[in-house]
Amino acid sequence: MNDFSRQATRLDEIGGRFDPWLLGIVCVLACLGVVMVGSASIAIAEGRDAGPFYYLVRHVVFLCIGAGLAVAAMRTEMKTIEQHSQWLPLVALVLLVLVLVPGVGVTAKGARRWLNLGVLTFQPVEAVKLMLIVWLSSYLARFRDEVSATWRAMIKVLVVACLLVGILLVVHKDFGSSALILAITAGMLVLGGANLPRMLLPVLCVLPALALMILMEPYRVQRLVSYRDPWADPFGTGYQLTNALMAVGRGEWFGVGLGASVQKLSYLPEAHTDFILAVIAEELGFVGVFAIIALYAGLAGRAFWIGLKCVEMKRHFAGYCAFGIALWMSLQSFVSIGVNLGLLPTKGLTLPLISSGGSSVLLTCAALGVLLRVSFELDRAQRKVALLRGDAQMPGAAMPATAQPLPSVTAEARGTSRLRQRVEPVFERALGRPA
């Protein structure tokens, strides 16, 4: 076996590792979610004659299923995901329209947002968020030059996003998820290199349209009015926010103690879902809320760092996926926290990994599984580069015994087409050749 064959074999033997910081933050958030859902939901479950631990058991079951989805995503190569990304906008469109089918779509709380899957109801917008991120990442990886230089490539992305948002607003009546999808799309376009002045015109067109959708629905106008002064109608439009603010104020610095919340005793609506942070603030105080915010900031920061490193190594699809998931988690947690603290108008967005909610838990776990896979492939690529450069074993690496650093590859081997097939473009740069 010649030097090149041994080199290629040893490259194939190199594995990677999942980012330990990212994995640790995800596990801590999931554990906090189990504890707080159990604490916040007992009174609600008993009030509905469902048994005190009904919502806790339900949350744990969905979390276990979500962990299975995450493991499946962590074991799937990003190139495989990219290969199946072309049709995702169409699949997302079909999922959103399915709620109109009699017997399949489910109406609850005046909105038709769920699909009846027999054993459970599923909210398709959660899957649509992940599908849009994967498709947009693939699109930006393939057309990043066109997106930054032409109107047509950028408008195509905005048309897809606006079509999905239009269905969400008209059929699902889900303004919160619509705004979130538009924000993720805009953020990914900016991170993908879109020209900022060119994006100004679409933004100026979308904002008045969103304002019009707010004015067309009286309950949305009432939410804005109650947001400005919830105490003007504390038993009507301001009921949720006033009770949330009382819970936050009662918690002070260190809280009243785990399980000792009063507002969760049927005073605070949706205490285990949309307003779970208010219960956390009451029971764990400012310290608990600060810890939650720090965990989400760490999650988003680590995801952006992983995405940046991927882009630097010319792994654009993986990098954009990391950017999109980071935007999703950070923006949704920001809105949920802002609503609970009275900083934003009331919207029905869950706190990722902490709030109870089957569809949200499942797809959040799947998205974080994809993010962990990105971190795994990034670490694997970095180790391969280090091997090709002849560097010593990287700190914390677990290279096979046969994969020790080798002398630099000969010029003849570098010139073969076989090397180009076995080694990624970034490795070519590591050998001193242009990718």
Image (cartoon, rainbow, N blue to C red):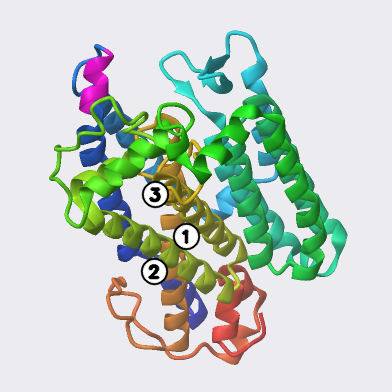
Nearest the eye: 134 or 359: 359
SS category of the residue bearing label 2: loop
Task: Identify the disc placed on residue 374.
Answer: 1
Please tell me whether mark 2 or mark 1 is closer to you in this view: 1
Residue located beneath label 3 in the image: 341
Task: Identify the disc placed on residue 14.
Answer: 2
Q: CA distance from mark 3 to mark 2?
A: 47 Å
Q: CA distance from mark 3 to mark 1?
A: 33 Å
Please tell me whether mark 3 or mark 1 is closer to you in this view: 3
Q: Amino acid at mark 2?
A: Ile
Which residue is located at x 60 percent, y 72 percent? 314
Do tag 2 and tag 1 residues touch (Cβ < 8 Å)? no
Question: Going by the image, does 208 lie left or right of 266?
Answer: right
* Quadrant position of the C terminus in the picture: bottom right
Nearest the eye: 96 or 3: 96
Q: CA distance from mark 2 to mark 1?
A: 16 Å
- Residue 208: give x, y in percent of width and height: 77, 47
Q: Amino acid at mark 1?
A: Val
